[in-house]
Amino acid sequence: MEKLLIKGGNSLSGKISCSGAKNAALPMIAATILCDEKVVLKNLPYLQDITTMFELLGSMGSEILLDENMDFTISSSNLKDIEARYELVKTMRASILVLGPLLAKYGKAKIALPGGCAIGTRPVNFHLDALKQLGASIKLRNGYIEASAKKLFGTNIKFDGITVTGTENLMMAATLAEGTTILENVAKEPEIVDLANMLNSMGADIQGAGSDRILINGVKKLSGTIFDIPADRIEAGTYLVAAAVTKGNITINGINPNRLMRVIEKLRNAGANIDYEDSSISINMDLDSPRPVDITTAPFPEFPTDMQAQFSVINAISSGTSNIYETVFENRFMHILELNRMGCNIEVKGNHAKIKGVKSIYGAQVMATDLRASASLILAGLCANGETVVDRIYHIDRGYERIEEKLNYLGADIVRLPS
């Protein structure tokens, strides 16, 4: 497996642009199943998860073309196979997103129970229970979800817990259901709004995305569209933290700061100077050590769980003691053991991490366990004394486009080592 070799101690400076958001792109690719016309997606990030989703649609019969502008044209008008096989699904939980579109468009679907990052239980029962309320028949057999419905009918659905992919799946399924569907206690993440905007551009009638109540008036069919993937807020947040831990000064272009307000707030609490405009954020960190900041993760618009691991690094080299409470996933502190191998002083009990800041950390050979854990280890390597080797970086390639190239452009010293 490939590794990253990081020589720490360089202060980052300069300007970079954000890639398209993986968490917005994946449901949009799944949504192309809903129509018979071509859909053009622009600004798709080049990531392993995107490749896997294309492989999944391609295995079912979708035609996918890449043009000279690096835009993807997807045609799913003639799917011959409505099965999402285990060998593709096992590496990416987002593959469950094809369930709703397949059921709405073709009346049946067979989806392997998904895999992905080992960051805790993310049950699909919210998806399945809600689809049953729309009129679907659901069976779990031999590790597969087998769903069927002659027709889906709009109804009122209240999720028992907030689920991003569950909200997206039901929103897509309801676009072609007969009548009106009301989804309550839904996720409010910006990617929900992005998906609703894309579906509406295809002829759907979705109202309220971004609030805790979404109304969908079913339509008979959807049309093709051309849609631009918005920038990745978690990528932007990760690079802001990279500047903070290296006493850097960078600007990130192409990002909506309103999607990162809790992250910006916590970075300012840590001592960073931050300015932003409509589509850019600048950070300047001139403190010798960041100030410690307490964090509790929660669904949007609160502090994102996808930034928890990165802030562990800020707090690890801070001038005091801090606390992080993880309320979204129950198994998302696996990076802590690796950070402690680099000289950090972090104690974990359940969903609580108590972090005592140290003056300096040192390079070591560490192993990534999931996507955001990978990012935290790279950030630690940037501010550590000596060399750090991050193993199992296939995790990072699932969610960050050319991360070592972008960081090197800002002044880092990172080399990708071959297998």
Image (cartoon, rainbow, N blue to C red):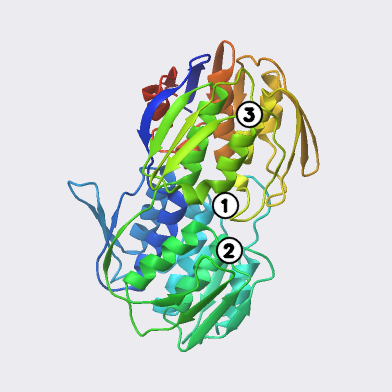
- 3 vs 2, front mark: 3
SS for tag 2? loop
Q: Choose the circle earlier in sequence order: 1 or 2.
A: 1
Q: Is residue 391 visible?
A: no
Query: What distance separates the C-alpha of mark 3 from that of mark 2?
Result: 28 Å
* Kind of residue indicated by mark 1: Gly
Density class for disc 1 (Cα within 10 Å; few <14, some 14-19, many ≥20) is: some
Label 3 close to label 1 by CB (< 8 Å): no
Tell whether label 2 touches label 3 (CB within 8 Å). no
Q: Which residue is mark 3?
A: 314
Which residue was labeled with disc 1?
A: 115
Specify the quadrant of the image occupied by residue 392.
top right
Vertical position of residue 97 compared to residue 158: above or below: above
Dot 1: what SS? Answer: loop
**What type is the residue that disc 3 sits on?**
Ile
Q: Which x, y percent locates residue 213?
A: 57, 74
Between discs 3 and 2, the one toward the N terminus: 2
Task: Give the residue displayed 44% in from the left and 76% down from the top.
Answer: 206
Residue furthest top as drawn: 386
Image quarter of the C terminus: top left
Question: Residue 406 appears in which quarter of the rendering?
Answer: top left
Residue 323 left/right relative to 240: right
Rendered image: mark on residue 196: none
User: Residue 135, percent across and down?
Assistant: 55, 85
Q: Which mark is residue 187?
A: 2
Report crowding for label 2: few under 14, some 14 to 19, many 20 or more residues within 10 A (C-alpha).
Answer: many
Judge the density around disc 3: few (<14), some (14-19), many (≥20) Cα neighbours within 10 Å.
many
**273 relative position to 328: left or right:** left
Q: Earlier in the sequence, mark 3 or mark 1?
A: 1
